């Protein structure tokens, strides 16, 4: 049973093709970095995986549940952090976490344990009792991340997680992802910071103009382009811009 | 330069019109544009000074016009009274009267008088009197009724005595005229109409939208980039607002019609139009002023609070404005025409309840006092709620934007199953959201108070089995307008989170109804408690209507939620998101429809309406599920016609028919069912044509109407039709005759009208078959089984006809549906229906002539 299986995923907005024939299979303990220039279709793909957008063509299966047919079962196995998380106006951070935990049918005691553990881990102790509208972007992202992992999903989908986090946050995030995947879970995230992606992830996918031009493990990718030393250079090569 | 300005004005109006159309649901552009987020504009302080100037100018102009109008009217009234007096004195008008309108009355009076004299018996005299009443304009008649008491004449006296009485000597004319003038219902009404115009403008002025603060659309950027002086920018903004106000003011069209009917003077129309234009500009200027103030001084949070207070104020004011209401004339006409089954206009305050009595000037004064009290109490509410916030009794989260809060309230540990979780969090958000709290507690009280005074002015009481139930229902559904209708809107930016949870999203929203329905039922209990304390009777009528309302509130909770979900656009980034305005009116329309179930005395009709409302709720629920599935995907446009929309189309047709009938009655003073039917069918077909651009299902109707397109109608088939219809009709008449179920009123047999025949044969079959079979039956077929679709569409069809003919109409509907299912051409059921109707009519003529 693969964690995530995407087949021939296509999305058209009128005549504009946002995502073109996207194929991907993720296995447990994979850290997959989805890279691509602005407007390549990363966020659109992620939204389709989460069932927020309807694919024009193709199939998405999370833990072997088709997202369009068995949405509820599929969503039990995935946690999602969007690029700009906003929360309800009149709820405090801790209440949002309780809410999410409750709605995921997590045991009350476990909810409390998770809250205590992750709030401490992500250094949100001061802010957690505050209303979520008052948080800065970084704090919102941390809160969103905790909300995403509240039910300990097999698959974590993070859309530009490091955007907005301070260096401490980035370090904590990376450590967390490493630990999380060692337990057998999978993380797929999109990012623009290629240097960080290089150190953290073990698989890479590069999108360009809606197409997944390259998807393989990092090692394989590096071996395919021995003359290009960094991921950055490989990225430029694959997406067609040559920079001196 | 002037070319430029004209071009700019043209573009503003075009843009404004598009935005207006967009607001009311007409998508001129299929792609949903993402509106850019707001940014603060730089107009600010300077703008307020410039605008103040505009305000003074327009305000002055308006008041001058109104004063001129009032003076003219007084003179006109005095002239008419003078004329009445002369007639009373001399029995004839003096021939040296110069006024042209008087010559007509002169001749008429004399003719009628002669005619009256010639009549021998009472009956014929009454006939002459009645025909005279019809010929004279409403003005004179009204003035006769009003002036007569002042001259000491009992209005029940006969015609001749009026015109021959020399009661008052000439010297006392001025006093008596003034007294008559003071008592004149028309004068009071004029005051009230002006007053309600003023109140209405308050309503439009204060209902500025928070999202207009610093709005930067591409068009504004372009405006600003043209380096225009600040005065021009503001003027353009005012023009834009004025333009949309012009359209908003169509809502007072009934008042204008009323004024026209009473006065019919040549000066009325141009003055009315001018007043309308000037008011729109005035209000446009006020709106821009308010916008600028909030942009520069007070900020978004205060603007939101101000908006909700204004909303409450405006609602209260609008309700009071309707106290200055339609005259007896319009009301009676309306009741005459509107079928008891579909009293769809009952929601509109103008056709509703109170009006002043001519003999009671105190009523007018009490209204003024009431308005003052209301405004004062609302102001007190505002102060009070502000005080509450300061003490921290009700925590205001949005007030804390940018500031850290003190940790005053302890964290709440939520226990229980998912259902309870949803409600617990909703409760939590409710108690923290001060705005909605005020709205749902204060507004229903205002509404209830309004109904109390409204009923007492009409010399009926609130403490009446029907009236109390209406009040309970209206208050309940009004609360829904602010609570369940805006459920999705109040999720705000956290909506995405709900879609990532492993739950059925529509269930999540429907679950919240429990909390909000509780508020409606709370007021429900309060109202009935008042009823009990004030000694209302618990008769059968009361209990029947009580259950109607009980079910109604439950059904409408679902309807309001569903409409709220359907009308919300989650992709817009505006701070204060409006639901699509057209849907608010749709909801109010549907509420009005249900109220007719309470008015209606026929229990079967009540039952029908409950069933229909229930069906609508079900149809809406399925639509919600499909809407919520890919709520955030702007490229998904659902083109499939749903059950809800099919039923809605039927409603539209009936409303159009009633409206056209009303207008034709107003114009020709006669019932013209054939012509109105024809016009309504035409309008309906045009609407269907436009709908077919959205719903491809509807497109093929045209082809289906031409039966030669597919298959020729065999002569055998034709013969079969004729036989079936005759057999059917015969059976129907025999059964009804035998069991004495035949109600003659239903069939209009006494005065057999050609109009009715033409309507029944040429108009009714076409449109009924298209609506019930081609649209409703076919849609139901695609969602449910054929049997269910057949039964249900026939049931609805039978419910739209008089109850006496329920069974045969139901069977006809069922037969038509099966025929349509077999042949797939709409022309076949149409022909069947034509034959059936003809058969019935032929048999009626033969049997009863």
Image: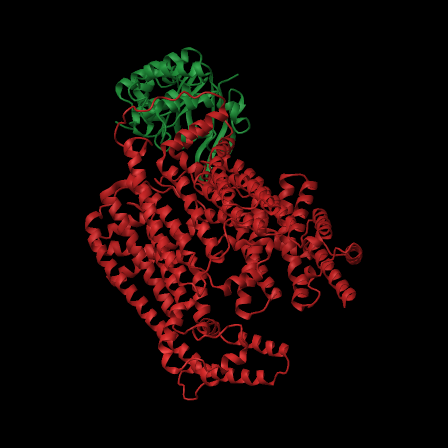
Chain colours: A green, B red
- Which residue extends farthest bottom? B95
Q: Look at the image and tell me in which quarter the C terminus of chain B lies.
A: bottom right
Q: Position of residue B132 (x, y in %)?
A: 54, 77
Report the side of A82 relative to B130 (left or right).
left
Q: Which residue is at the front of the view, A38 or B698?
A: B698
Q: Which residue is at the front of the view, A26 or A187?
A: A187
Q: Position of residue B278 (x, y in %)?
A: 32, 62
Q: Position of residue B673 (x, y in %)?
A: 61, 64
Quadrant of res B784 = top right
The tally of labels here is 0
Q: Is residue B62 above or below residue B544?
A: below
Report the side of A173 relative to B674 (left or right).
left
Q: Look at the image and tell me in which quarter the N terminus of chain B lies.
A: bottom left
Residue B154 visible, this angle? yes
Q: Which residue is at the front of the view, B58 or B782?
A: B58
Q: Which residue is at the front of the view, A153 or B141?
A: B141
* Residue occupying the point 54% across, 63% down: B332
Q: Is residue B646 above or below residue B426?
A: below
Residue A14 visible, this angle? no
Q: Is residue B497 above or below residue A229?
A: below
* Residue occupying the point 60% across, 62% down: B677
Report the side of A140 relative to B459 (left or right).
left
Q: Position of residue B829 (x, y in %)?
A: 70, 53
């Amino acid at each position: 049973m693969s964690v995530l299986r995407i087949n021939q995923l296509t999305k058209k907005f009128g005549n504009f093709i946002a995502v073109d024939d996207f194929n991907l299979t993720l296995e447990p303990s994979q850290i997959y970095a989805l890279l691509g220039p602005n407007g390549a279709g990363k966020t659109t793909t992620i939204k389709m995986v989460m069932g927020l957008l309807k694919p024009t063509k193709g199939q998405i299966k999370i833990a072997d549940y088709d997202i369009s047919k068995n949405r509820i079962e599929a969503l039990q196995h995935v946690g999602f952090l969007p690029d700009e998380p906003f929360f309800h106006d009149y709820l405090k951070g801790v209440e949002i976490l309780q809410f999410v935990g409750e709605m995921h049918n997590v045991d009350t005691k476990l909810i409390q344990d998770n809250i205590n553990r992750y709030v401490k881990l992500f250094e949100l102790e001061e802010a957690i009792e505050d209303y979520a509208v008052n948080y800065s972007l970084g704090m919102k992202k941390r809160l969103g991340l905790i909300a995403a992992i509240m039910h300990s999903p097999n698959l974590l989908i993070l859309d530009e997680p490091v955007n907005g986090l301070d260096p401490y946050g980035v370090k904590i995030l990376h450590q967390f992802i490493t630990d999380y995947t060692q337990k057998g879970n999978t993380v797929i995230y999109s990012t623009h910071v290629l240097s960080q992606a290089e150190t953290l992830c073990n698989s890479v996918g590069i999108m360009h103009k809606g197409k997944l031009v390259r998807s393989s493990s990092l090692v394989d990718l590096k071996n395919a382009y021995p003359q290009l030393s960094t991921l950055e250079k490989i990225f430029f090569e694959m997406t067609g811009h040559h920079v001196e | 330069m002037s070319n430029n300005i004209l071009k700019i004005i043209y573009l503003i109006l075009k843009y404004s019109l598009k935005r207006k159309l967009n607001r009311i649901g007409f998508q001129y552009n299929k792609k949903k544009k993402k509106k850019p987020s707001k940014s603060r504009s730089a107009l600010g302080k300077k703008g307020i000074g410039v605008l103040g100037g505009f305000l003074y100018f327009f305000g002055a102009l308006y008041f001058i016009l109104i004063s001129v109008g009032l003076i003219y009217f007084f003179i006109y009234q005095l002239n008419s009274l003078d004329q009445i007096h002369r007639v009373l004195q001399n029995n004839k008008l003096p021939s040296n009267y110069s006024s042209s309108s008087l010559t007509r009355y002169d001749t008429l009076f004399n003719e009628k008088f002669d005619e009256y004299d010639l009549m021998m018996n009472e009956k014929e005299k009454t006939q002459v009197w009645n025909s005279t009443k019809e010929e004279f304009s409403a003005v004179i008649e009204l003035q006769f009724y009003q002036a007569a008491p002042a001259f000491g004449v009992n209005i029940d006296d006969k015609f001749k005595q009026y015109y021959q009485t020399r009661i008052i000597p000439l010297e006392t004319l001025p006093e008596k005229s003034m007294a008559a003038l003071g008592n004149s219902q028309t004068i009071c009404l004029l005051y009230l109409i002006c007053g309600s115009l003023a109140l209405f403008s308050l309503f439009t002025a204060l209902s500025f939208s928070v999202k207009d603060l610093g709005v930067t659309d591409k068009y504004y950027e372009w405006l600003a980039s043209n380096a225009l002086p600040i005065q021009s920018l503001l003027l353009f903004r005012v023009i834009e607002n004025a333009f949309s106000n012009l359209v908003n003011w169509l809502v007072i069209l009934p008042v204008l019609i009323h004024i026209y009917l009473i006065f019919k003077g040549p000066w009325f129309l141009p003055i009315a139009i001018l007043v309308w234009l000037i008011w729109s500009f005035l209000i446009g200027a006020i709106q821009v002023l308010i916008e600028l103030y909030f942009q520069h001084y007070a900020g978004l949070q205060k603007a939101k609070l101000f908006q909700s207070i204004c909303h409450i104020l405006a609602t209260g004011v609008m309700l009071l404005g309707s106290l200055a209401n339609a005259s007896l004339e319009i009301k009676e006409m309306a009741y005459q025409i509107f079928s008891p089954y579909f009293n769809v206009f009952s929601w509109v305050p103008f056709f509703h309840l109170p009006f002043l009595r001519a003999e009671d000037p105190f009523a007018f004064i009490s209204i003024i006092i009431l308005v003052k009290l209301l405004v004062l109490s609302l102001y007190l509410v505002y102060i009070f709620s502000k005080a509450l916030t300061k003490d921290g009794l009700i925590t205001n989260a949005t007030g804390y934007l940018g500031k850290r809060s003190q940790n005053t309230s302890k964290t709440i540990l939520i226990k229980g199953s998912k259902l309870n979780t949803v409600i617990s969090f909703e409760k939590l958000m409710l108690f923290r959201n001060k705005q909605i709290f005020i709205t749902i507690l204060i507004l229903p009280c205002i509404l209830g108070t309004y109904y109390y005074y409204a009923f007492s002015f009409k010399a009926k009481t609130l403490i009446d089995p029907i009236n109390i139930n209406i009040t309970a229902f209206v208050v309940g559904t009004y609360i829904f307008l602010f609570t369940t209708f805006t459920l999705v809107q109040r999720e705000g930016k956290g909506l995405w989170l709900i879609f990532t949870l492993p739950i059925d999203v529509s269930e999540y929203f429907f679950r919240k109804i429990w909390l909000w329905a509780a508020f409606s039922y709370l007021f429900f209990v309060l109202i009935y408690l008042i009823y009990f304390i004030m000694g209302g009777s618990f008769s059968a009528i009361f209990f029947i209507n009580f259950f109607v309302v009980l079910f109604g509130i439950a059904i409408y909770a679902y309807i309001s939620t569903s409409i709220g979900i359907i009308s919300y656009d989650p992709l817009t980034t505006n701070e204060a998101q409006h639901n699509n305005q057209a849907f608010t009116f749709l909801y109010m329309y549907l509420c009005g429809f249900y109220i007719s179930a309470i008015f209606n005395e026929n229990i079967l009709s009540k039952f029908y309406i409950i069933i229909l409302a229930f069906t609508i709720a079900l149809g809406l629920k399925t639509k919600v599920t499909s809407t919520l599935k890919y709520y955030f995907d702007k490229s998904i446009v659902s083109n499939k016609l749903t059950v809800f929309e099919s039923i809605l189309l039927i409603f539209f047709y009936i409303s159009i028919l009633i409206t056209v009938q009303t207008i034709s009655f107003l114009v020709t003073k006669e019932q013209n069912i054939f012509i109105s039917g024809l016009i309504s069918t035409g309008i309906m077909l045009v609407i269907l044509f436009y709908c077919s651009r959205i719903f491809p299902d509807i497109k093929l109707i045209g082809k289906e109407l031409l039966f030669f397109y597919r298959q020729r109608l065999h002569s055998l088939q034709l013969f079969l039709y004729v036989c079936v219809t005759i057999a059917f009709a015969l059976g129907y008449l025999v059964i009804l005759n035998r069991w004495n179920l035949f109600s003659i009123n239903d069939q209009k047999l006494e005065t057999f009208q050609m109009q009715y025949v033409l309507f029944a044969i040429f108009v009714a079959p076409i449109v009924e078959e298209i609506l019930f079979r081609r649209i409703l039956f076919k849609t139901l077929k695609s969602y449910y089984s054929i049997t269910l679709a057949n039964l249900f569409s026939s049931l609805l069809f039978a419910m739209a006809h008089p109850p006496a003919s329920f069974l045969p109409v139901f069977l006809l509907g069922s037969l038509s549906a099966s025929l349509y299912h077999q042949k797939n051409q709409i022309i076949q059921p149409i022909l069947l229906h034509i034959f059936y109707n003809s058969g019935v009519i032929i048999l009626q003529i033969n049997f009863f002539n």
